[in-house]
Each structure stands twice: as C-alpha cells, then as structure tokens.
Amino acid sequence: MTRAGAETADQSRLRLASDPYRPAYHFLAPCNWLNDPNGTIFWKGRYHLFYQNNPDAAFHGGATGTIHWGHAVSEDLVHWQDLPIALAPVDSYDRDGCYSGTAFVNMEGVPTIIYHGVPGGICLATSRDELLVEWEKHPANPVIPTPEPGSGYTVDGAPCAWIEGDTYYALTGNTSREEFEGQKPDRAFLYRSVDLAHWAYLHPLYEGGKYTEVGEDCAVPDFFPMGDRHVLLFASHHRGPHYYTGTYANQKFTPERHGRMAFGETNFSNRTGILNECQTLLDGNGRRVMFGRLSEGRYGYVQRASGWSGIMGLPMALTMGEQGELHLNPVGELEALRRNPVRLSDIQLAGDSSITLDGVRGNRLEIRAVFSWEGAEEFGLSVCCSPDGAEQTLIRFNVNPNDSTQPQDRLSPDRLLVLDVTRSSESQAVKNRESQRCTVRHAYGEPIELRVFVDRSIVEVFAQGGHYLGKRIYPARSDSVGVQLFSLGGDATLHALEAWEMDAIWPI
C-alpha cells in the first residue's frame, strides 16, 4: 500500500507496470515491501488477504515502525481490489511494528484480528464495516503482554486464535533469540480467555523436535481442524514452511505426521526466491484455501532500486490424504484467466532428445501435461527457453533418483520431481539459483500429470497427488519464451498437453 496523501494504489501499479519481473496474475502489493500473509478470512462472500507491508520502501525495516498491515479483497480469488492499510504502528505497544497474526470471528459475530505488536505483545483489533476497512484496536492492548525473560513462554511467534465452546484460545510460536541460542526444538504456547481482554497462559500446545531439526522454530502458526485430525501449519526461519497433522484433545496437540512445503538442495537456510510463510482460511463452501508468500531471489540492492519486493503464490486448495499428508492444488477459479488454448497429443519422445513446441510460447502460461515413460530415466518440459537454450527452467521427473541399475519395473515407486532453475537467468542480479525438489510416490507404468504455471518471474508446479514446487526466476532475455519437451535415457510419451495464455489482472 501507499501512504495516505501519496500516490494511489492504482497509480503505483501503473508506475511499476513496465517492470518485466512483476507478475501479471499473482497477487503482489501495489509497490514497496510485501511479507507474510496475515489475517486471511472469508467474510460476507469475500476473501480478505492482509499482509505485512512497508508502505514507504522495498525493504523490511526491522523494528523501526515500518511494518503495517496491507489489505486486499476478492470475490473470486483471482481479481483483487486494493484497500487502505488496516493496521499501522501508531500506539505505544505496537510502535515498532504491527507484525504477523490471524483473523477470526468472535462470539459476538465480529471479525477480529489478533497480531503481534512490538514491543508490547499480543494485540487485538475489530472491524464492523462490510469491507473490513476500518479497524479499532482493543482498549486492553496488549492483551497478552511480552513476558519477562525466563517466563517459560514467548509471544513473538505471531498468534492465531479460535473458539471452543465459551472459551477463546490463542497460540503463539517460539521465534525468540532465547530459543535459538538455547537450541530448543520448535514448540508453541497456548493461552485461554473468556472475554478477550484477560488471558492466562496454560502450557505448550505440543513439543517438537521429533520430525524437525535443531534450531527450527514454530513461526506464524495456523492451527485448525481438518476431518478427524488437526493441522498445525507453520514456518521455520531456518527451512521455510512445513506442517504437522495429528490429534488434539484436552488442549494438547500430538503431531503424528510431518511434511514440508519447500525443498532446497544444499543450503536449507537460503529461503530466498521460494515459498515461505503460509496462512489459510475456510471459505463459504467449507474449502480450506492457503495463501503463501514467495520472496525475491535477487540481491537486496536490486529489490530496493526496483521499488517493490515479494509476491503471493497462487491460492491453493488444501486437502488431506489418507495417511495425514497435505495435498496442495491450485484453486479452480484460476481457470477464468485462460485464453487462446492449444491442445497437443500423442507425441513420442526418443531418448536423449528434445522437441520445441511451436504453438506454445510466452511468459504467462498454464500448461497441463500428461506423460508416460517406457525406458526414460528422466523426462519433462522446459519453460521460458531462449532459442539457444542458454536460458531455460526445467521441470524434471526422474523415475530413478537413486541411480539404480535394476530394470525400471523393479524400482521403488519413489520418484523425484525437480524445478530446476540453474539456467533460468543469465542476470547477475539473481542471488539464489538453488532448485526445488520433492519425492513423488508413483507406480511404474502409470501416467503422471504435471501442471505448470508461469508468470514472468515465477514458476509453480503441481504434480499429481497434491505435490507443489515454486521458485522465482528472472529470465534476462526477452526471447526466453519457448517451451520444450525432453526425455533422457530412453523413450517417453506425451499423451496430452493443454496450454493457455493467462490474462493479466494487473497493468503490464
């Protein structure tokens, strides 16, 4: 957002429209800094997305009063309207920043934000207008003050809140320096209130460390039921977003399964250019929708000079598999952006070959491709390809990630999906060229469907079974718009491919 009295949001978007790296159909702030998704809520038929925002410059700013809550609203998860800043750090308890939090509807039916105000602690605000534009901070703020060192709990992991019967519960994670220095595992702290103004600390909601690494924390937690299980979605400052699914009883959560949503290769502390903080809402159809931020993968000086930083990934529908694993898929509403369809079928790919698709080009695309393999060890497609191949982003499906010499029909069903960005850009401004990868269990002989979304400086991949990979790319060449198919080590078949140009929702 922009400051009152300065240029409007529309003017900011027009001013930055010539930047070739600004996505055309992903959500991003009109200008300057965008960070965590906050306060996501479905209210009176509209999706509300709040987000950490520095309205004055394209950097975070630290504890200097730069962090506000930006706000946008949508009726279809595709087209967004910019609204005024919702929270600003103007009070003594949040003067250093209105940091992350969530939203819920209180017992009186009023939308309520719970957030981390620095330096005071956990704060509340409510809104009674239809578009949730005007927010009134609670007179008892901070309702959960920042505790003294040694209190046994912290409040700086950002809060979420919910209602059980006639009682409010709030949850904060552990991101304080004390936790890092003590090498304690991730954990979260539970509080209870009957009136929102007075809160009592109860105990840790859970104890982590079984599935996670030493030094990981539980930042920006989002805790919610799904079927007969509960989900704790959170982020690690060390490795990015992940989750537990498990059982919740007697105000205690027992994690039973753990999964990650970002997968580096060698440097797990490098969270630039990938999916980071995530938050969900439950919409009017009972669908759990997830929003996640993808940070920039360029050097900080480049971001500041460009006048903007950070985008949201595509909204995703979150579901749970039989074993408690989470599945991520793009929401169906995105199909409204499709234009100029191209359909191909039954293309044979000989081993160690590639084919350029003459009818599929661009840097704003959705591609759905169904492959099978005969003897191929790896196959897939490349997007944002320059004619000489110097720039390209590869989506690689490796059927033999352990390089076994056994016949393929005897291999484990574990495959490797890779979003390979090592050649995505010739620009020297790109800082992180580390690819994303995840394991996909897929039986030999069964076709695999890949969905690929390209939006100028970002590629997101969804694989059959609810797998997701996302990465920022920055092609330096204007002719890096080609699409290719390839196969390595043996033959593969493209059974069907559909591709669409995607409409822009912002000025470009």
Image (cartoon, rainbow, N blue to C red):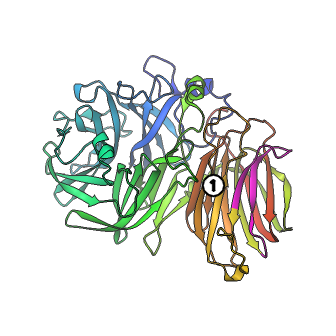
Q: Is residue 443 magenta?
A: no
Task: Using the image as rendered, state which of residue 410 and residue 36 is in the foreground.
Answer: 410
Task: Report helix, strand or loop for mark 1.
Answer: helix
Residue matched to label 1: 335
Q: Is residue 52 visible?
A: yes
Q: Give residue 256's quadrant in the image.
A: bottom left
Three-letter amino acid code of the residue under disc 1 = Glu
Count residues near mark 1 (Cα–Cα under 10 Å), then give few for <14, some for 14-19, many for 20+: few
Number of labels in the image equals 1
Q: Give residue 53's quadrant in the image.
A: top left
In the image, the segment drawn in magenta is 374-396
Residue 211: image location, x then y, percent: 39, 63
Residue 340: image location, x then y, percent: 76, 51
Q: Is residue 384 magenta?
A: yes
Residue displayed at 24% across by 33% down: 137
Is 374 located above or below residue 205 in the figure?
Answer: below
97 to the left or right of 283? left
Residue displayed at 68% across by 28% down: 18
Residue 54: image location, x then y, percent: 44, 28
Task: Using the image as rendered, state which of residue 347 and residue 434 is in the foreground.
Answer: 434
Residue 481: image location, x then y, percent: 78, 44
353 to the left or right of 376? right
Q: Is residue 175 visible?
A: no
Pick the quarter of the image with the C terminus: top right
Residue displayed at 23% across by 64% down: 252
Residue displayed at 18% across by 48% down: 152
Q: Residue furthest bottom?
A: 410
